[in-house]
Image (cartoon, rainbow, N blue to C red):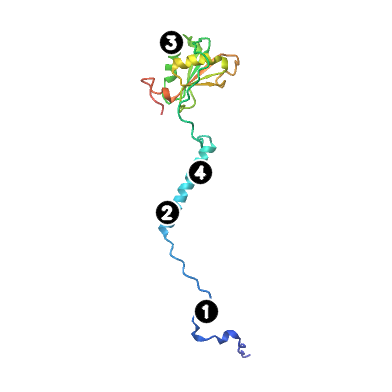
Amino acid sequence: MPKTPDPKDRFDDLPVDRGRVGAHRAENPRLRGGLVLLWSAVATVALIAIGIFGTLVATGRVVPFPAPSGSPAPVATAEPTIDTGYTVLVLNATGERGLANLVRDEILDAGWAGEAVLASEAGADDFELTTVYYPTAEDEGAARGVAQLVGATRLVLDDAYQPADDPDARQLAVVIGLDRAGAAGDSTPTP
């Protein structure tokens, strides 16, 4: 069967000299590869930094708010007294070995019995200020006396360092801070 020509419609009668007809899009400008690479590197570094900081905050290693600066000055409300009836726990919270024993010797020289003063290393090595902890308000005078004796710059009313097996024990705790580091003379810092 022979093919019959298609019927004519309006598209068959276009003038030849009209030029281009239809939608024409401009070419994409050339992307600058160096600029794209730079922005990618900046975004990658920023995301990694945010991830590390977020992880440190989530694990409790970094507090997002700065700690108050300066050393708090204790307000004297009780007269400092040397009361050897208290046991004293000395914890070295610096990286300097032997500092707890040095402070223990200072306390023993003031009249405490050897079994009444315990010295040990703390779980941290970045405690800022030497602090004396005392369990009740009635113990403040004895805590002030020990603070003067060892050169503590801070007193804290807190029973966190009281023996769990004897709630009636009279114990003061001295946590040695970085403000006392260097006082042990020939001691060597921990790695």
Mark 1 against mark 4, which lies toward the viewer?
A: 1
Residue 23, placed above or below residue 177: below
Density class for disc 3 (Cα within 10 Å; few <14, some 14-19, many ≥20) is: few
**Which of disc 3 and disc 4 is earlier in sequence?**
4
Element carrying mark 3: helix
Look at mark 1 in the image and give the residue it sits on. Answer: 21
Rendered-image quadrant of the C terminus: top left
| Alpha-carbon span between mark 3 and mark 1 | 105 Å
**Which of disc 3 and disc 2 is earlier in sequence?**
2
Where does residue 104 sit, x and y in percent of width and height? 45, 15
Where does residue 48 sit, x and y in percent of width and height? 48, 45
Query: Disc 2, disc 4: CB below 8 Å?
Result: no
**Which of disc 4 and disc 1 is earlier in sequence?**
1
Element carrying mark 2: helix
Q: Is residue 79 left or right of residue 189?
A: right
Q: Which residue is at 59% across, 19% downward?
A: 164
Residue 38: mark: 2
